[in-house]
Structures are given as C-alpha cells and as structure tokens.
Image (cartoon, helix red, strand yellow):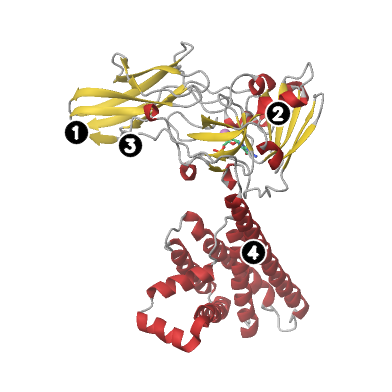
Amino acid sequence: MTPTLPRSALAGVLAAGAGLGAAELVAGLFSVRETPVEAVGAAFIDLVPPWMKDLAIQLFGTNDKLFLVILIVVLLGALSVAAGIIAAFRRGLGLVLLVVLAAVATLAAATRPGAGVTNALPSLAAGLVAVVLLPFLLDRFVPKRESDNGRRELLLNAGAVALGSLLAAGAGRLWLGRRLGLEDARSALNLPSPPTPQPPAIAELGLKGLSTWQTPNDTFYRIDTALSVPLVDPNEWRLKVHGMVEKPIELSLADLLKRPVVHSWATLACVSNEVGGDLIGNAQWSGVRIAEVLREAGPLAGADAVKSTSVDGWTCGTPLSVLTDARDSLLAFAMNGAPLPLEHGFPVRMVVPGLYGYVSATKWVVDIEVTRFDRFDAYWTPRGWDEQAPIKTQSRIDVPRSNATVPAGDVVVAGVAWAQHRGIDKVEVRVDEGPWQAARLAGEPTVDSWRQWTWQWTGATAGSYKLQVRATDAEGDTQTDQLAPPAPNGASGWHTVSVKVN
Ligand SMILES: Nc1nc2c(c(=O)[nH]1)N[C@H]1C(S)=C(S)[C@@H](COP(=O)(O)O)O[C@H]1N2
Ligand SMILES: [Mo]
C-alpha cells in the first residue's frame, strides 16, 4: 500500500465531520441541547484557571465563546487529519486517536451539571460513526496500484459523506428546534383552572423506601414504540371520532377544553411489568370523559370496540363498554397538574382505569374509531398479546429491598397493591411460607389507584428469610400464586423478596 498523505488526511477529516453530523442528529432526536463541541467547550470553561478566562475576555470580548468553539473545531480538525494519516500507516493507532477524542467529548458531556445518560449519546454516536467510517474511506481513497489514482471515486465518496453529514446535522437541528418550540407551546398552554394536585393524606403512609402514592411526572415509567417523541403542535391537534356512530365529530384542543373537565387519580400499568417490577405509576389526570364525547357521536348498535390511533400510527383496541361505563376513562391533557409531558402523549392521550396501557392508554391520540373487535387488529395483537387485557390483581414489596440486610428486631415491611377499578380489600404477608398475616392498609381515595400497605415483622431474629405478599381485591378474588410471564396478558404470581436479618 502506498498511502498518500492528503487523501488519508481527507479521510480523517471526513470521518470526524460525519461523526459531528451524526452527533447533531442524535442530539436532535434525544433533545440534547449541547453538541459534543459545545460540551467540550463548556467543560473547558469550567476547568481553566480564572486568569486565562480573564485573558480570553480581554482579547475577544463577548466573542470569547465563539472563539473557543472555533478553537475546538480547528483543534479537532488537526487531530482528525492526524488520525487519518496515522491510520493509513497503522490503522489501529489512528482509530485509537478517534476513540480518545470521542471519550473526551463523552466525558465532558456526561459531567455537565444536570446531565443524564442521554447527554453522552451524541458524543458516543460521533465516535462510533467516525471509527466505522475512517477505515472504509481509507480503503477507497488510497490507491492500491500506481496507475489507479481513483480521482472520480474519491470525489464521489467524499461528496457523498460530506453531504450526508450536512443533511444529518440539518435534520438534527431542525428536530431540536421543533422540539424546543413545542416545549415553549406546552408551557404557554392555558389549561382550565390548572389543578395543583394534593394527594389525599389518607393514601400516603410516608414510609421510607415505600413508593410515594403519587408518582411524579419525571420518574413516571415510559413505554412506547416511538423511536423519538412524536411532536404534535397543540394548535394543529385534531381528534376525529368516527366509524360506527350516528354523527362523526372532530375536536380541536380548544373544543375539548370547553367540555366539563374532571381531575381523577388513576394508576397506569404496563402489561410487560414483571412481578415486583416498576412499570407502573399513579398520577392525577385531567381531561374530558371519553364517554361524554362518545355519547355525542352516538355509537351504533353492534359496535363493541374503539380503535384509537396515535399520530405515529400506533393503534390500540379498547372495549366500548369500558369507555362508556361510569369510570373516568379520559381524554387527558394534564398529568399531575401540568400539561402532559411530550413523552407521555402531549397534547392529549387516553387513560382508562383498569386496563393495561397497551389496550387503553393511547398517547398522542388523533383518531377514535367506533368499530367491532372482529374488524381490526390493534398494534400488539398480531404480536402475541391478547386482544383484551384487564389488569390483574397484584402486589409488590418495596421495603425491605430484595437481598437487603436488616437489623434484628422489629422490621417494617411495606409496599403497594393494585386492582384498578375493583379496589384492594386485603393484603397479606408471610415469612418463609408461614401463616399469612394481614397488613395494615392505607386509605383508598379511589379504587382506580394502587393502595399502600405495611406490616410489622416483630422480633425478627438473625438468619435468611423469604418474604411474600398477596392481595385480595374488593370482589373477593385473591391474587393467584400461579407464576405467569407478562405475555400474553400480564404477569402473575406472588412477589418474593429475600432478606437477611443480623
Ligand atoms: N402512541 C402510543 N401510545 C401508547 C403506547 C405506544 O407504544 N404508542 N404504548 C402503550 C403502553 S404499552 C403503555 S404501558 C402506556 C405507557 O404510558 P406512559 O409511557 O405514559 O407511562 O402507553 C401506551 N400508549
Ligand atoms: Mo405497556
């Protein structure tokens, strides 16, 4: 191989540039405000001594940040030229240089104040793309024979990579801009008498380690098939209600907000939640009863289902009877007193107490079709999940945690139990398959939410034990001990926790 320096250098710059393009795209998709260059710049500012900062301000005035970004880009350019040239001779060594660059950016991004895991994703994507692309480009750019200078191929490849990088960056910027614009629209939204939800005091035992009765929005589990959050402009949102109805209707958000609004607590649960799992949360939902809207449209005889569709095409099938009975099945626009977070279905989603999310809780809902179950398949049905799925009575031990070690004596055991829209009447705990002992229950402000419970394990002595819990719903049905996996209609079995007493 006869490596030619300019071509290897070009390969290095293109690989790094494509990495930055990918980073912009990923930043846009995951709503990360700082791209790798900006993260490195910000980390640099935090690290440099004050005299250097002062010097920079003296030299460049208010352009000091711009200068820093340019400096980093130039430095990155020089290092990627070096990576390309080194890789032409010692491939592994050149790639290591790229990995180090990406690692520095990742570290900078991940250690920004308030940074989460997603902040690292753009830099990781940049590193990955650059490391994959550099060998590919070198193989194409560097001629294998003297006679074959491959200028045409070089230009085509270089042009394609540069164009692709720019397109990725542009798409990322555009997406991020829309997302931030939507966040603004969300904060500006004027909801009817915004409630400040106060969880009823009787529901909250306030024990350490026990899940709070109300789940805050930022820790509420999120499940959906959307790769990136669907962005729906609240001013353009429309809900079509049609199908087997006397009078199809179409609602804007303003139309919806003119109707009677209810604020009701309900516990949302995912069918994929394992026994003891945390894909469940309780919130106050504000919205309009679906029954109200359906009554206006007038379902025709013979209809038994509602097929709801999200703006991203995801579909869900819910029994018509559940949406028209007395429970608060909602077209919800607020969660815990705030406009729905984008991830939880902004501007409007469905919430139906008593049914697993996949058959009831359509986020970003735009279409409600009254129909029959024998006329359609919702998204998850052909994928091995039941057409209809009421939530199974379940209970969970939150304290002590599994495999915890606790001091001998009196041990507080506590958790939550749920049987949405039926209610919880009894929770029992047992130690090492001994007799079942009744737990003390917190109040139950609504049968649509989970219920906290606690049981005092008195005089626990040193040793290893197995704690188990089971709940009985208000219909008198006790949670089955039969272990079942989540598919096809929800996990069952008793939550079991191993603890050590010393
Ligand atoms: N548009 C849309 N809505 C959806 C889903 C989805 O994939 N797409 N998933 C459902 C499932 S499986 C669950 S458990 C709940 C979860 O709602 P959350 O993310 O607000 O907790 O949303 C439901 N609504
Ligand atoms: Mo789910």
Can residue 486 be seen at all in this image of the molecule? yes
| Direction from residue 224 to residue 153 in the image, left or right | right
Which callout, 4 or 2, points to the residue nearer the camera? Answer: 2
- Judged by depth in the image, the label closer to the viewer, 2 or 3, is 2
Frontmost residue, 128 versus 148: 128
Amino acid beneath label 3: Gly
Alpha carbon of mark 1 to alpha carbon of mark 4: how far?
54 Å
Say which element carries label 3: loop
Residue at left 46%, top 55%?
116
Any mark on residue 209, and which?
3
**Amino acid type at image mark 1:** Pro
Q: Which residue is mark 2?
A: 293
CA gap, disc 3 to disc 1? 16 Å
Left or right of 51 in this view: 290: right
**Three-letter amino acid code of the residue under disc 2:** Val
Please state which of the two labelled residues, at mark 3 or mark 1, is closer to the viewer. 3
Q: Which mark is residue 433?
A: none
The disc placed on residue 407 is 1
Whichever of callouts 4 and 2 sits on the residue coming sooner in the sequence is: 4
The residue that label 4 is drawn on is 173
Q: Nearer the viewer, residue 175 or 238?
A: 238
Is tag 3's residue or tag 4's residue first in the polypeptide sequence? Answer: 4
Q: Position of residue 491 (x, y in %)?
A: 50, 26
